[in-house]
Amino acid sequence: MRTVGSIGEVTEQKIYAAAAELIAKRGYEGINLRQLAKDVGVQVGSLYNYISSKQELLFNILNGVMNELIDAVKATVLMEYTPTAQLQAFVKLHIQYHTNKLPAVVIATSELRSLEPENYKKIVRLRVEYETYLREILRKGCEDGSFTIENVRLCEYAIIGMLTGVCVWYNPRGTLPINKLTNYYQEFVMRLVGAETRDANARPTVVRAKAVARR
Amino acid sequence: MRTVGSIGEVTEQKIYAAAAELIAKRGYEGINLRQLAKDVGVQVGSLYNYISSKQELLFNILNGVMNELIDAVKATVLMEYTPTAQLQAFVKLHIQYHTNKLPAVVIATSELRSLEPENYKKIVRLRVEYETYLREILRKGCEDGSFTIENVRLCEYAIIGMLTGVCVWYNPRGTLPINKLTNYYQEFVMRLVGAETRDANARPTVVRAKAVARR
Amino acid sequence: MRTVGSIGEVTEQKIYAAAAELIAKRGYEGINLRQLAKDVGVQVGSLYNYISSKQELLFNILNGVMNELIDAVKATVLMEYTPTAQLQAFVKLHIQYHTNKLPAVVIATSELRSLEPENYKKIVRLRVEYETYLREILRKGCEDGSFTIENVRLCEYAIIGMLTGVCVWYNPRGTLPINKLTNYYQEFVMRLVGAETRDANARPTVVRAKAVARR
Amino acid sequence: MRTVGSIGEVTEQKIYAAAAELIAKRGYEGINLRQLAKDVGVQVGSLYNYISSKQELLFNILNGVMNELIDAVKATVLMEYTPTAQLQAFVKLHIQYHTNKLPAVVIATSELRSLEPENYKKIVRLRVEYETYLREILRKGCEDGSFTIENVRLCEYAIIGMLTGVCVWYNPRGTLPINKLTNYYQEFVMRLVGAETRDANARPTVVRAKAVARR
DNA sequence: AATGAATGAGAGTTCATTCAT
DNA sequence: GATGAATGAACTCTCATTCAT
């Protein structure tokens, strides 16, 4: 007995949304399709009208979100003119994606190990591309004197770690609004890269004061 | 028929070592006791002479490593006299534990979600304690003017994220020696907390040179 | 949306043709309706406009081919005047049906076990009728001295086994033309029944020579 | 709760015996492991202490029985001195294996198609070896004048088909004793190969009488 | 007449766990 | 202490079948 009026596309979206959420909470290996089906509101077998395997589910989520992230970098970060502005934009983007926006992003970091070799390669390739944008910004900032970084690669890792760590503790229903959070982390990153801080109109006043004091 | 010369205690240690390694690589849900038994060199049934359940295995690993970490903080970090020196020691300790020393530490971050509620509470309590040491250092550093931090809690998270991120990419067989790595991250953290850099006897000379150049 | 120009009757024929082929290759239990639908070029659900169940599909194929076979026996074999000629005709018919003509015939032997009891009885009744024609020919041949058979029933089984075995190895794209193959098997059967071989104008010369020599 | 006193080797034999019987009756695709487990008297999961997959079960049965068959040919058929005696022995062996002795033999003919490519190749190789023994006997019999066969290959197929067909209808609880059955089929085969019948000390008297009568 | 979306039962397989020996 | 044999529940995935559109 089929659910009346059901539409495939809607079901598919529901499946991927529910899967991302479930996996983000319990991990790929920790979830089972029965639970997913229940969350979606269908029978287990019906999932297979939309996916060909549990693995594919994971891959599609990861693939989708990484491409989205990369597109977003291209659309917002690379548009900025200075390394500093680009870095600020990168932080903003990363934070936003890693907090309220998508549980899928969380998975992109923690569930890579559950990908089969072929899929693993593909997603890692995208991660590398994403992180390369950050590294390039850092490199250019060093060249034009905006940043002072001794080991760019390590600094890149430090930034990624710091920003990604947000999704471990961030609670969208907490008291800290995202734009405030973003500002704080922008300041953290600016400090990390040893940035000159004249242009920092986006940063909180206290920070600006300190920057002045440091000179 | 018991393997000749095998001694229980040795087997137990082997089990925990192998389990930590396996879980670090594939996650708690991703491993199975058959594989563990094979790695240890016994039959599955024999594991149950040492553990009462798979869950207990995870809990004991986490419990052990968190206590070790806390003890280490007490023994090395809190011994230092200034917030700056303490922070440097904290970074050194954390980095060392998260690289070559223990695969168990990796798990302490990523496998919390697989703990049953009761066990979860216990381990989180230990994590909180551990992180509280860091926060206290930051707070004291702010008070005595060593650090300039607007939001201590956030800064704490940023540091933890940054430091913990190391275990994602660090390769013990790579070219970067641990003490150099440690130095770099110490510098990152110093920047993050807006530390005055006069006293930085623990930091690498290169950095000091740069600091000079910056002025 | 219905495929333009498709007509039910054509689809039905396609279904039965594809089903016979699939079942002949993989067995009734080994096929699935999804594959059948794909081969036919429709969706699975559409099959049910023509069949009421997978079982019915099998039954109809078997029923159809057995009736065809029986009709063919009546039309060609029983028309002959002597037991020898009838037997030759029977062999020819059986071989032809079991080689290039119908994959359905293959199924008639191997897939009986997959029929539900009721259907099983019906098809077996037809098989018995078919084999009875052969037995009657053998019996009459014994009576009039054309054949020399001690145990007619066993001889019948031997012939059926021998002839049916053809479909196991016969390759329609091989070098052996069907009429040659038929001649060989006619000779085999003639030998089996201890037939006097005067009339054997259809048989290869060598055999005739041998027959002469034997006397 | 383990069944007390169970012994692995016994269970394994039970599994293979039950599997051969089940598959012979319903086909590889037609059986399910739950039924097999029930027949054996264990839980489904326990089967996997002895097999690694359903497919392996089929392969092992087929592999075992084909090797047994080949060994038996070497031990009994090839020991005979004349092609006629060898052929008689071959028939006897084949009939015996295909009737009361082993349900596994039935499978060896009908379930080949369910083997995965790799396994299929291996079993077919054994079948070819087995059938080659028969062909060689036929060939030698032609050379020394014992047999008169125009197309040896076809004759081989005819014999195999005839003999193998026995397992379709043979009922071990019927009235026809195996040795009688064997004698009849030996006579069928002798006729098929156009054997001179002077030497037929191995054949039943009835047959010899008939042979006389024919002259 | 055909499609697309769903069902629900059941398949092979895995796995933590138990326990007599 | 260790093993080998078993359990039973749960897993991913398949499939015949249904039915509104």
Image (cartoon, coloured by chain):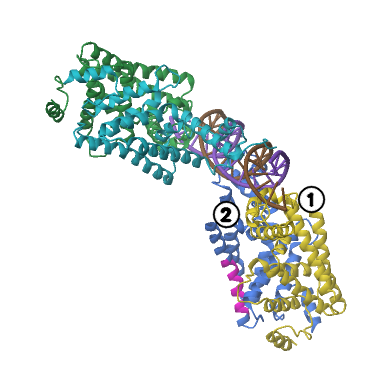
Chain colours: A cyan, B green, C yellow, D blue, E brown, F purple
Name the one closer to the observer, A86 or B194: A86
Is residue C48 toward the left or the right of residue B14 in the image? right
The picture places residue A191, in percent across and down from the top left corner, at 24, 25
* Mark in front: 1 vs 2: 1
Q: Which residue is mark 1?
A: C117
Does the segment drawn in magenta span residue D113? no
Q: Secondary structure at mark 2?
A: helix
Quarter of the picture holding the C terminus of chain C: bottom right
Q: Amino acid at mark 1?
A: Pro
Tell me: D13 left or right of C5.
Answer: left
Which residue is found at the position 41% from the left and 33% from the top?
A: A110
Residue D98's place in the image compared with A86, above or below, is below
Pointer 1 with pointer 2, Cβ within 8 A: no
Query: How many angstroms separate mark 1 from mark 2 (CA)?
Result: 30 Å
Vertical side of A59 occupied by B107: above or below:
above
- Crowd around label 1: few <14 · some 14–19 · many ≥20 (10 Å): few
Which structural element holds mark 1? helix
Q: Is residue C137 left or right of residue A171?
A: right
Q: Is residue D135 magenta?
A: yes
Between residue D96 and residue B64, name the one nearer to us. B64
Give the residues in magenta. D128-141
